[in-house]
Image (cartoon, helix red, strand yellow):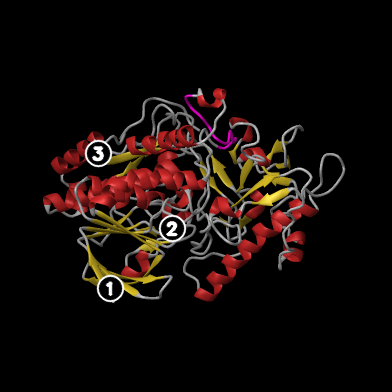
Amino acid sequence: MHKHSADIIIIGGGTGGSAAALAAAKSGKTVILTEETDWIGGQLTSQAVPPDEHPWIEKFGCTRTYRQFRNGVRDYYRRHFPLTAEARSQVYLNPGNGGVSRLCHEPRAAVAVLQDMLAPYIHSGRLQILYRHRIKSASVEGDDIRKVTMTNLITGELVELTAAYFLDATECGDVLPLAGAEYVTGAEAFSETGEPHAVAGEALPQDMQGFTYCFAMDYIEGEDHTIERPERYDFWRQYKADFWPDRLLSWTGVRPHTLEAVDYELFEGTERYSLFYYRRIIDSTNFEKGFYPGSITLVNWPQNDYWLGSVIDVSEQERERNLWDAKQLSLSLLYWLQTEAPRPDGGHGYPGLRLRKDIVGTEDGLAMYPYIRESRRIKAEFTVLEQHVSAACRPEGKAVQFDDSVGIGCYRIDLHPSTGNRHYIDISSLPFQIPLGSLIPVRMTNLLPACKNLGVTHITNGCYRLHPVEWNIGEAAGFLASYCLDRKLIPRDVRNTESELRKFQQTLVNYGIELTWPTIHPV
């Protein structure tokens, strides 16, 4: 067994894990970051999800390093790509000009920028990244993790990692059960949280938001790139959920905030909303003519959300079956688009749609990792509830102000259809803060959450799960572990000691983390 040690071990190299590694290394600590896939970055890269952000993102409302990442993506295209003069002159260049974000870009661009941001610490030896490693077990004494054992997914060899602090930045909160940490999954009961949108009756721990295998495609007119008919195509072609207005593989979807049926179209040019435009990551008109044979879009649509089963706290066999079935859904959507999707001209199918395996770096053309919207969540010293951030619950027009804020975020409370066959929950929220109490487990002393696994509920996860918020969570966790090491404290001491809390918050401010919002409106 190989053995390594560092000041801080970060398990999971996603958006939050990468930000945590950057913060901890910047603070002078030795760090080992582990990642299951070939790419760090999570939502931004291996899950292939263009950033979901709030309306003020270009001016304020994110950490300094997240802004550096965003600017780095734009500079990456300006430095290396033959942009048109018009595109190059745009201060807020959007490579894809997609509708979902002011910065739609290829996952590979995000990988390159993240690697550049971490390069000084990798080169100096302060940061080591173990790719293709998954946690196997954790050794715990009392309330402390002493070591974790990782499996090298390529060789099968085991690696033992020891540290003073361990950060769980896995997409599903995988460290929590292995360490015996108290955690929650699924939908809490109204009797537990009092949240207006919590479930009546008993809690539903297996009722979680659906997950999605994203993929990229372009369109080459006159060519035929039809994939092999997926094994489960007949099932998915006919599938219709009771709460859905039509078959899932159709142009009919749902407006999440009203639950009204809505009809989509593939391309722009009709009155219907274009799904190709929705998450377009390359707009070929931004580049010299012919450089890209066609624009590229990222397919993370209502039609490939998978809600027939979860991948958390189920048997390995069930987990693998649900992952495979979710892949079959995404491939079936593509096949339907290529062969049967109704066209405005009365025909059917777009065979020129080409699965871009290179964009996501896989042989099957699907993202390296599924887009996981909902993780295990720690039982925390403080849990953020719907009542703290919902516009409907806060008639004064401001979210609850947290005295122990370690960052900010803003997004609607957005829950996709769930594994319990429950519909969208999409409600207005107010720009909110990230309380330090939500990063502190109720018992464990040297374990911190660093992504979507903080102290939120099934409901508030819906607004705390997006890219800039996860980045802020991870960054705050990285700085917190470092602060505790420097002062020989544990995280709850920082929160519960007024002088230490203020010093820590000032440290965050000095590093460019915003703790409060100006007066702005709900989203």
Q: Is residue 489 left or right of residue 354?
A: left
The amino acid pointed to by label 3 is Leu
Q: In the picture shown, does residue 469 fall above or below 200? A: above
Q: As displayed, is residue 493 above or below residue 141?
A: above
Dot label at residue 2:
1
Question: Residue 439: horizontal and vertical position, in percent?
Answer: 31, 51
Asked where in the image residue 328 lies, by quadrant, the reply is: bottom right
Please name whichever residue, 248 or 444, is drawn nearer the observer in this view of the structure: 248
Mark 3 neighbour density, 10 Å: few (under 14) some (14–19) many (20 or more):
many
Amino acid at the residue labelled 1: His
Q: Residue at x 44, y 48 (%)?
A: 111
Residue denoted by label 2? 171
The mark that comes first in sequence, 2 or 3, is 2
Task: Report whether 52 appears left or right of 365.
Answer: left
Q: Nearer the viewer, residue 507 or 13?
A: 13
Q: Residues within 10 Å of mark 1 (few under 14, many from 20)?
A: few
Q: Is residue 442 above or below residue 147?
A: above
- Whole-angstrom CA distance, mark 2 to mark 3, is 24 Å
Q: Kindly state the secondary structure of the residue where label 2 is placed.
A: loop
Horizontal and vertical percent position of residue 69? 39, 39
Give yes or no for residue 94 being in the magenta stretch: yes
